[in-house]
Image (cartoon, helix red, strand yellow):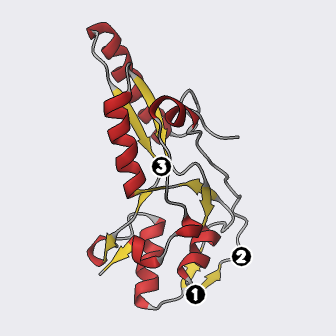
C-alpha cells in the first residue's frame, strides 16, 4: 500500500522527526496565515559526478563499485523496494509546488514507482554476490496522486527508460 501524505507511521525516529517538523511548519503557517509548502523528495538521484560517490546512500555505493569494476557483496534483501525521483523530476515538482499551491500542504515528489536493489543491480550491470542472510524484504512506495492532481506534476524519468549517462557524469 503506498504511503500517502497523511501517513502517521512513527515506528522509526527518522520518519517521526520528519513528520514532527512538517506538523510544526504546517501548524505555524495556519497561525501566521502564511502558506508553507513541503515537498517530500523520495531518494533523489541523477547526474552524479565521481566525487559524489561517497557511499552516503546505497545507490552511490553501487555506482562507485560499478565505476571501479568491483563485485559488490550485498547484505540487504535485493527484493526490497524504495521510491526514487530523478533530479529533473524533483526540480519540476518543487517549481510546480511553489507556483501552483494555494495553501499550506505536503506533496510527495517521486516517480510514483519503486525500484528494488535488484532493479538497480541489473540496470547498472553490476557484478554482485549475495550474503545469504534472512533479511526481510521491505516494500515501500509513496502516493503522488495529490501532486499530480493539484500541481499537474507528471514525472518523466523512470529507471527502465534511463541510460547510464543520465545518472553518471565524468
Determine the CA span between mark 3 and mark 1: 26 Å
For the residue labelled by badge 1, is the local secondary structure a helix, a strand or a loop? loop
Q: Nearer the viewer, residue 103 or 149?
A: 149
Nearest to the eye among marks 2 and 1: give it.
1
Q: Earlier in the sequence, mark 3 or mark 1?
A: 3
Whether the residues at callouts 3 and 1 have beta carbons within 8 Å, the answer is no
Horizontal arrangement in the rendering, residue 57 relative to residue 7 (left or right): left
Q: Nearer the viewer, mark 2 or mark 3?
A: 3
Query: Which badge, 2 or 3, is on the more N-terminal residue?
Result: 3
Q: Which residue is mark 2?
A: 132
Between disc 2 and disc 1, whose residue precedes? 1
Residue drawn 44% across and 29% down? 106
Q: Tell me residue 42's x, y (percent).
A: 47, 49
Report which quarter residue 39 is drawn in. top left
Query: To which residue does mark 3 refer?
Result: 42
Task: Using the image, determine if residue 93 lies above or below residue 146.
Answer: below
Residue to which mark 1 is pinned: 127
- Cα distance between the residues tagged 2 and 3: 28 Å
Question: Closer to the camera, 59 or 34?
Answer: 34
Amino acid at each position: 500500500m503506498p504511503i500517502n501524505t497523511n501517513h502517521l507511521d512513527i515506528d522509526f525516529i527518522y520518519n517521526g522527526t520528519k513528520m514532527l517538523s512538517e506538523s510544526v511548519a504546517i501548524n505555524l503557517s495556519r497561525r501566521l496565515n502564511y502558506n508553507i509548502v513541503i515537498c517530500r523528495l523520495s531518494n533523489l538521484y541523477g547526474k552524479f559526478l565521481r566525487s559524489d560517490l561517497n557511499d552516503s546512500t546505497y545507490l552511490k555505493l553501487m555506482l562507485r563499485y560499478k565505476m571501479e569494476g568491483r563485485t559488490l557483496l550485498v547484505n540487504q534483501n535485493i527484493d526490497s523496494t524504495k521510491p526514487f525521483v530523478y533530479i529533473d523530476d524533483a526540480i519540476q515538482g518543487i517549481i510546480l509546488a511553489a507556483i501552483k499551491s494555494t495553501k499550506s500542504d505536503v506533496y510527495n515528489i517521486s516517480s510514483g514507482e519503486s525500484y528494488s536493489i535488484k532493479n538497480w543491480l541489473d540496470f547498472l550491470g553490476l557484478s554482485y554476490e549475495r550474503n545469504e542472510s534472512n533479511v526481510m524484504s521491505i516494500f515501500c512506495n509513496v502516493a503522488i496522486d495529490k501532486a499530480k492532481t493539484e500541481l499537474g506534476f507528471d514525472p518523466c524519468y523512470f529507471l527502465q527508460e534511463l541510460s547510464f549517462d543520465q545518472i553518471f557524469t565524468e
